[in-house]
Each structure stands twice: as structure tokens, then as C-alpha cells.
Image: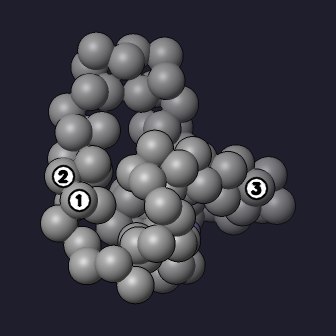
Amino acid sequence: MKTMTCRQLGGACDLELRRETADEIIQAQDTHLKEIVAAGDEAHQSALDAMKGRWKHPIKGMGWYKDTKRDFAALPED
Ligand SMILES: [Zn+2]
């Protein structure tokens, strides 16, 4: 397992997410963004918009995925 924070994933808080793979942690962040914005948080709105934009434009969003996967791979195992 590895840990990344919401902020490391482009978000606005220090919530720690722990997952086995980069794909899983990106998915967890996506869920976190949707939930917190749905609950009325405005600080995460731009991060959610950016995440939605990546799903819609996977080619353009690829750079972010690659960077995130590289960052994840560089982290030590918990
Ligand atoms: Zn957050």
C-alpha cells in the first residue's frame, strides 16, 4: 500500500488516501472530490472540474495520469 494526499492529487485538503495502485488512488480521489463537492465544499470544485475534464479528454489528460503514476511509483511502500 502507498499513501498520497488529496493535495498531491490536485485537491485542496490533506486527506490521506491509501491504495495498492495508482489507478485505484486516482479513482479514490475522484470519489472524494465528488463526495466533498456534493456536500457543499467549494475549495475542491476546481479540482473536480479538472478531473472531469480528464475523463472527457483522455488524451489531453494523459500527462496528468503519467505524472501521478510516476509520483505514485516513486513513493515508498507503507
Ligand atoms: Zn480533499
Question: Which of the two residues, 19 or 60, is positioned nearer the viewer here?
Answer: 19
Picture residue at 37% right of the left edge, 57% below the top: 10
Indicate the amino acid at tag 2.
Arg
Looking at the rendering, which quadrant does residue 2 occupy? bottom left
Task: Give the residue pinned by disc 2.
Answer: 70
Indicate the amino acid at tag 1.
Ala
Picture residue at 49% right of the left edge, 24% below the top: 55
Q: Position of residue 18 (x, y in %)?
A: 53, 72
Question: Which of the two residues, 68 or 20, is positioned nearer the viewer here?
Answer: 20
- Residue 35 circle label: 3
Indicate the amino acid at tag 3.
Glu
Structural crowding at the residue carrying mark 1, measured as other residues with C-alpha within 10 Å and reported as few (<14), some (14–19) or many (≥20): few
Distance from disc 1 to disc 2, alpha carbons, whole Å, reads: 5 Å
**Is ligand 1 closer than 8 angstroms to the Cβ of mark 1?**
no
Distance from disc 1 to disc 3, alpha carbons, whole Å, reads: 26 Å
Looking at the rendering, which quadrant does residue 59 occupy? top left
